[in-house]
Image (cartoon, rainbow, N blue to C red):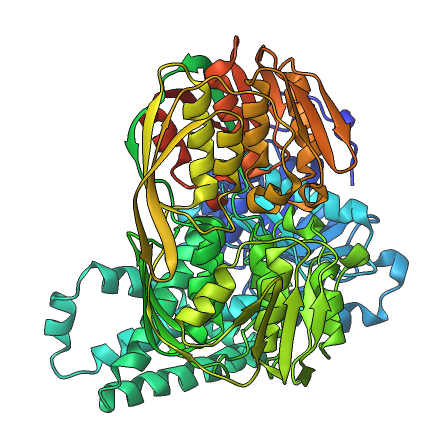
Amino acid sequence: MSDSSLFVGKKGVGSENSITDTVAVIGLGLIGGSFAKALKENDGARRIVGFDRNPNELQAGLSLGVIDEAADSLVSAVKNADVVVLAVPVRAVEAVLDEIKTEFKPGAVLTDVGSVKGSFVKAVERVFSDVELSARPAVIPGHPIAGSEKSGVSAANSSLFVNHKVILTPLPQMGCEALKLVSALWVRCGATVLEMGVDHHDDVLAATSHLPHLIAFSLVDTLAGEGDSKEIFKYAAGGFRDFTRIASSDPVMWSDIFLSNSASTLKVLDHFADDLAILREAIATQDSKTLLGVFTRAKAARDHFSKILSGQAYTTIMNSKNVIFKLKPGGDVNGVIRVAGDKSMSHRSIMLGSLADGVTEVEGFLEGEDSLATLQAFRDMGVVIEGPDEGRVKIYGVGVNGLKQPPGPLYLGNSGTAMRLFAGLLAGQAFDTELTGDESLSKRPMERVAAPLREMGAVIETAEHGRPPMKIKGNCRLKGMHYDMPMASAQVKSCLLLAGLYADGETSVTEPAPTRDHTERMLNGFGYPVNRAGDTASLIGGGSLTATKIDVPADISSAAFFLVAASITPGANLTLKHVGMNPTRVGVINILRAMGGDIEVSNESVVGGEPVADLTVRYSQLKGINIPEDQVPLAIDEFPVLFIAAVCAEGKTVLTGAEELRVKESDRIQVMADGLKAVGVDTQVTPDGIEINGSEIAGGVVDSHGDHRIAMAFAVASLRSKGEITINDCANVATSFPNFEALAKQVGMQISVEHE
């Protein structure tokens, strides 16, 4: 490998910006030719040498400017090359390597572009087994995920790899310098480089590339053999043409690929054949439920992946771009709105509806990323779910014992609620599961649920310091127990009650202070009795749930941002419709009223066991208070925006007994204190709370630390700010309140959103 400082000349013809001196491309087909052309145009190497067995292709490559030099033999192409790229059919690799195995210059790097890596590595091992280690090239197998049905050097396209992925499968014994060089060459061609193990690569490509090609070839061949094939192709729609386009690919190349990757291809082909047989049987027997299950799972999975996966399935964060809120100072808060559906109830409606016998219909489901991740997780466990469609979801329950093992880890995004509830629900299943989440969720403590579940007999592994991922072993017999919670937490209580569904005997939980009781109410709504005696909730394991209808009310946690917004903005008059008024959730209303807030409750009713009402909020001058500790658990998620209310109040507001705030999506006490300082407000942080004196908000730049409630709280602060407020890291607002920006603008806030 050469030092780029040795090269002199204009960019595009080998300049000081070149990555290496000489690259030899063996095989000038579509991929080899496109790679050579891209390197040449983007100054990847000072000199591009090409070789092809077909002299016409070789000369065309030279005349078209794809390569700088045409080698007259394999040996001459390789002799002085710093990097040798094999772009030949996968079953021709070994013969080519045999011919050049002793011709590599010292320090040379060998890579390839084949879509099967196992056969390439085996060929390398066989060919170089009798060559001295010092005389062998460094080998970095590679595979660009790009192509076309066209072939030959005349189809070479220097933009073929732009915004496409290239997978490198480096061998353990190869040095990192060779890997860096090959990676840099692909990046210079506009590609994104990923690394993967050889075997894993071949399994993944068998499923995502090889099987679709096989199906396309087979389908076209089958239809071409029909008696009315001309009519079939004449009236084929765009979908048929799009899918079967790949049947125009090079037959020789693809025959080689299937034979070279036979084990992985047969594995996924057998799985597909089994599933195809199930579809055939469903059509033959008029089994609409099976068809609906397959089709809805497929559509949901495709939409889910398209929406949230920018990298590798179930490993990236759900919303990876940095979203920035910018808010001009001041604004009005007026009108009539309905905020997003309650996230806690949306999670639970999917969970309990999936475990019920019969069909559960849900209205008002929150279509945020966290709730959708829960929905997808149950689809992965075999539950047929229609929707969501404008908040409507239909769940075909499988019964308490009807869940199936998911194909991989269950990805729960940013939701601590989902992970803790899933832990209880899955602890009693017959199969192993793993729960994962995004970067933020991976920092959240899970021992608070794992420890009591282990006392019930569950076998659960967590990562360092009790954090996700959580691995839950199946076939563990759970025993009911009584648990005194050391800290009030609806998530811990719900987790243990859900585990209690699968436990022998009674499971009971006593809480030190009231927490939200959606799980108990909803279980009762599904016909599963939960008893309440003072501070203790209990149930008997072994029962069943019956499908029902659920109307998810507007989320009071989401409404809280607008309750505070109207309370602190002179002239405000805002009505929030159909808000959930569960007695365990109304702490924000009680606290604002204690501070002098003007909140009117009307149109009270009970829907599906949950109280709802309309709330009308008008501006009033708030007063600082000592927040009653009995209200803290009833407003635990609303404190970030209540801190903004405290800043706008006269006098001092003191919060105590709120240790739970330190283990949310962020340490909400400290992060809010840091954010308030950034906009000119001083606070006094205590171990279990904070002291805030009413003061002016100057404006500034706030880091939300990826916490959606922090981001939205400071958006509300702009209504009383003297200067503009910029809030970084706001992508996760979509997890709980997907239309926050639209509603904020509707009521009169001056918000704009930028994507980095």
Q: Is residue 625 left or right of residue 245?
A: right
Rendering coords of residue 412 (x, y %): 56, 57
Rendering coords of residue 588 (x, y %): 51, 37
Q: Is residue 126 left or right of residue 494?
A: right
Task: For the N terminus, give its image quadrant.
Answer: top right
Residue at position x 54%, y 59% from top? 53
Rendering coords of residue 656 (x, y %): 71, 36
Q: Is residue 450 left or right of residue 321?
A: right
Q: Which picture quadrant has residue 740?
A: top left
Query: In the rendered image of this protein, does residue 408 appear above or below residue 413?
Result: below
Report if residue 432 is visible in the image.
no
Residue at position x 52%, y 77% from top? 265
Q: Is residue 285 left or right of residue 531?
A: left
Judged from this view, the residue extending furthest toward the front is 534
Rendering coords of residue 10 (x, y %): 61, 20
Query: In the rendered image of this protein, does residue 726 appear above or below residue 112?
Result: above
Query: In the rendered image of this protein, does residue 522 appear above or below residue 571?
Result: below
Report if residue 165 is visible in the image.
yes
Viewer-proximal residue, 169 or 24? 169
Residue at position x 79%, y 32% from top? 3
Residue at position x 57%, y 56% from top? 417
